[in-house]
Amino acid sequence: MNVHIIIVDVLLGLTVLTCWIGVIGMLRMREPTPALHYLALPATIGVVALTAAVFVETGPSSAAFKTLLIAAVLLAINSVVAHATARAFRTRELGHWEPRDGDPMEWTSKQERNT
């Protein structure tokens, strides 16, 4: 078997594995906000592995550079989309997104943090 094929298969396997870990992690979370953290794995490691696999398979081609552009966009907007989604969950639950006294939060002020 060719080393080239093995490298592509390993990179594609890593992409699939990160996607499955992300899905299983999201399903295991009880609340939607912690589940958002599992989107980062396929959107970072999975996308980088997929881009590397395309570059190994096709070389510096048009498809490879388009994949690189898509990977850069995903890496850039992943945290923004996760933050906006978490804010939307909070707004739906509480009717607002700003932290206010009495809201169900882990840390709302310095005094609560020190006790």
Image: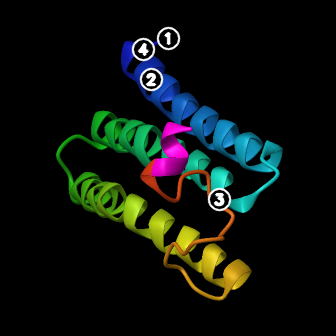
- The rendered magenta stretch, by its main secondary structure, is classed as helix
**Mark seen at residue 13:** none
Query: Which residue has dot 2 on it?
Result: 5
Asked whether disc 2 touches disc 1, contact meaning CB atoms under 8 Å apart, the reply is: yes
Helix, strand or loop for disc 2: helix
In percent of the image, x 43 and y 37: which residue is there?
45
Asked whether disc 2 touches disc 4, contact meaning CB atoms under 8 Å apart, the reply is: yes
Query: Which residue has dot 3 on it?
Result: 33
Mark nearest the camera among 3 and 4 is 3
Q: Nearer the viewer, residue 31 or 104?
A: 104
The amino acid type of the residue labelled 2 equals Ile
- Between marks 2 and 1, how big is the CA–CA gap? 7 Å
Query: Which residue has dot 1 on it?
Result: 1
- Tell whether 25 sits left or right of 42: right
Helix, strand or loop for disc 4: loop
In percent of the image, x 50 and y 23: which residue is there?
10
Where is residue 14 drawn, in percent x and y?
53, 29
The amino acid type of the residue labelled 1 equals Met
Where is residue 55 drawn, in percent x and y?
28, 40
Asked whether disc 4 touches disc 1, contact meaning CB atoms under 8 Å apart, the reply is: yes
- Between marks 3 and 4, how big is the CA–CA gap? 44 Å
Where is residue 65 drawn, in percent x and y?
21, 56
Q: Magenta residues, as a range?
A: 111-115
Helix, strand or loop for disc 1: loop
- Between marks 2 and 3, how big is the CA–CA gap? 39 Å
Helix, strand or loop for disc 3: helix
Q: Quadrant of residue 92?
A: bottom right
In percent of the image, x 58 and y 72: which residue is there?
101
